[in-house]
Amino acid sequence: MSIWLGDFFPNFECDTTEGRLRLHDYWGNGWGMLFSHPADFTPVCTTELGALAALIPEFTKRNVKCIALSCDPVESHKEWIKDIQAYNDISTFDYPIISDPERDYVIKLGILDPAEKDRIGLAQTGRAVFIVGPDKCLKASFLYPGTTGRNFNEILRVIDSLQLAACKKVATPANWKNGEECMVLASVSNEDAAMMFPQHVVKDIPSGKKYIRLTPQP
Ligand code: BEZ
């Protein structure tokens, strides 16, 4: 990826299924999620865009606006949405899909997959996810190959973790699920931890170092 954690996310103007827009204006003051897929009218992508369409209320609850991207033209995206809705049995489709026929944005974002070629031999886009904070800086990203469909519940789980770290000063451990125990951030002093997380416990471990501080999810 050529976009690193903490980088200011590129703000481009683009054509989408909901008209021409500027990415940061579309995201507004909240969080944003951009996800790319290799091509329209492909089977795994059809399941992914449908899975996200069904979960849009969960993203909205978290103040996250979603946008998809594939290189195909807007007219193709619009035709394909009908298949996505039929296949996934959904009546809504409440997010735009960007078109990038010249591959301007996918090259800038560094998300082409050289292993996957289209009919005329051009590299296709990988399955990238970018989660961007209200400051428009990158908070998390994943990049999968075309053959691996993403888990959109995992993306929600990551967003829950990012928002807890940003607002509540806790981190989330391996395999954490929303509502489970969290860990006080190392940047919080013991004095502040006592005030901010009165129920936290410090785990006894062989090193004697007191760095594992567990708290109910704030
Ligand atoms: C698919 O969406 O089915 C797909 C796209 C590119 C490579 C492999 C699978």
Image (cartoon, rainbow, N blue to C red):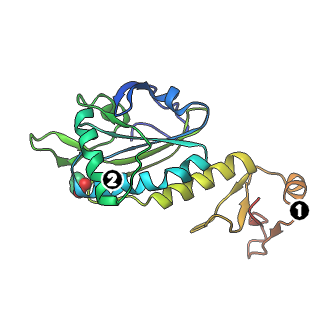
Question: Going 29% across and 54% down the picture, which residue do you hit?
Answer: 46
Q: Secondary structure at mark 2?
A: helix
210 or 181: which is nearer to us? 181
Image mark count: 2
- Residue 185 is situated, as x and y percent measured from the top left of the image, at 73, 54
The N terminus lies in quadrant: top left
12 or 171: which is nearer to us? 12
Binning the other alpha carbons within 10 Å of mark 1 as few (below 14), some (14 to 19) or many (20 upward) gives few
Q: Amino acid at mark 2?
A: Gln
Q: Amino acid at mark 1?
A: Pro
The answer to whether residue 198 is left or right of residue 109 is right
Residue 85, numbered circle: 2
Residue 54, numbered circle: none
- Residue 144 is situated, as x and y percent measured from the top left of the image, at 35, 54
Label 1 to label 2, Cα distance in Å? 48 Å
Q: Quadrant of residue 12?
A: top left
137 or 78: which is nearer to us? 78
Question: Going 56% across and 59% down the picture, which residue do you hit?
Answer: 157
Tell me the quadrant of ligand 1: bottom left
Q: Which residue is mark 1?
A: 198
Binning the other alpha carbons within 10 Å of mark 2 as few (below 14), some (14 to 19) or many (20 upward) gives some
The answer to whether residue 36 is left or right of residue 214 is left
Mark 1 and mark 2 lie on one chain; the one further toward the N terminus is 2
Taking the image as drawn, is residue 145 in sight?
no
Taking the image as drawn, is residue 186 in sight?
yes
The C terminus lies in quadrant: bottom right
